[in-house]
Amino acid sequence: MEKTENLLQVSSNPHTRDTGTTAEIMRTVLISLCPAAIFGVWNFGFHALLLIVVTVATCVLAEFLYEKALHLPITVTDFSAAVTGLLLALNLPPTLPVWMAVLGGVFAIIIVKMLFGGLGQNFMNPALGARCFLLISFSQAMTTFTKVDAVTGATPLAVLKSGGSVNLLDMFIGNTAGTIGETSAAALLLGAAYLLICHVIDFRIPLTYIGTFTVFVAMVQLFSGNGFSVTYLLAEICGGGLLLGAFFMATDYVTSPITPGGKIIYGVLLGVLTGIFRMYGSSAEGVSYAIIFSNLLVPLIERISIPRAFGRERRAS
């Protein structure tokens, strides 16, 4: 009896622990984003590289100076600021002025992240919050895209929305206009596979998100009377940052549900909202706004998806 009692230890939650650290997780995310970042630089040239370097440096420096000024523990070594900077850079047009990227980096770290308590306390994804801030403030600069040959052109989704046709192979490889990190579906899928293999993200959110969006677009095609087109459907999936958002931003630990059922609800909501914004909105995109709106609903989603203890009713509060 005494031996059994010695084996039992009562402790406070959490009862499930992991040896992984925040820094290790963030380093894995940085590595997973490298294929998209490298392809973006190869695709768009030196200015794309400059935007990536400046945005990452701005985010890290902004967090360091904020914590230094307020005498808070320095947390830049956890690489979360670097991840925010890289994600923001990959969501920027390759021709954006550098000073706008700097402003976006400061907004992401100071306004969206640090003023709400730092990592773990922000209510929305900092990189997407900054992207939407830049879209509202500098709409022309944020919606001016270049092709591989540096000629200004519309994104594939904008072409689809206007009734044109696109080259699906070019979209998969990345030889199209768009933001630095969204053009190559192949590079994004490579990074996503690395995250899944390393067990950094849960498959429920991205697969539910993409699956729901796929069903939504297919239903819109069928009920519109224009017929079903596989090419159109695959182009919608490969374009507009859907893969970047689904695997790298919607899965953010802080701003996504932790309950298994909540992840499914969250993914369905993301897919429906993205479909509505793309099919019926004035813009051909919609991923950023869908994720931010869903981030705001995460507390409610978790409240209604808390597993019920055996033999007890789920509490409303």
Image (cartoon, rainbow, N blue to C red):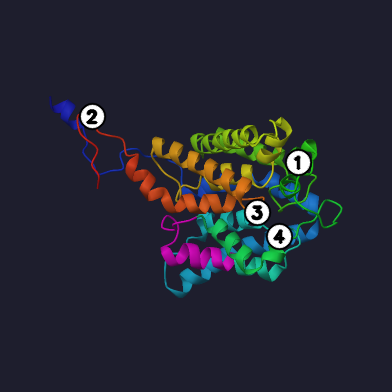
Q: Can residue 110 be spotted in the picture?
A: yes
Q: Which residue corresponds to mark 4?
A: 143
Asked if 92 appears above or below 181 in the picture, the reply is below
Disc 2 residue crowd, few under 14, some 14–19, many 20+, Cα 10 Å: few
**How many marks overall?**
4
Along the line of sight, the residue nearer the viewer: 261 or 106: 261
Local secondary structure at mark 3: loop
Q: Which residues are magenta?
A: 105-124
Of callouts 4 and 1, the N-terminal one: 4
Left or right position of 61 against 311: right
* Residue bearing the label numbered 3: 283
Query: Measured from the top left, where is residue 289 in percent x and y?
Result: 55, 54
Q: Earlier in the sequence, mark 1 or mark 3?
A: 1
Q: Position of residue 220 (x, y in %)?
A: 61, 37
Which residue is painted at 22% across and 36% down in the image? 9
| Proximity of marks 2 and 4: CB atoms separated by less than 8 Å | no
Identify the element where label 4 is drawn: loop
* Residue 203 belongs to magenta span: no
Measured in 3D between alpha carbons, the distance from the residue under mark 2 to the one under mark 3, in whole angstroms, is: 47 Å
- At label 1, counting other C-alpha atoms closer than 10 Å, the crowd grade (few under 14, some 14-19, many 20 or more) is many
Q: Which residue is mark 2?
A: 310
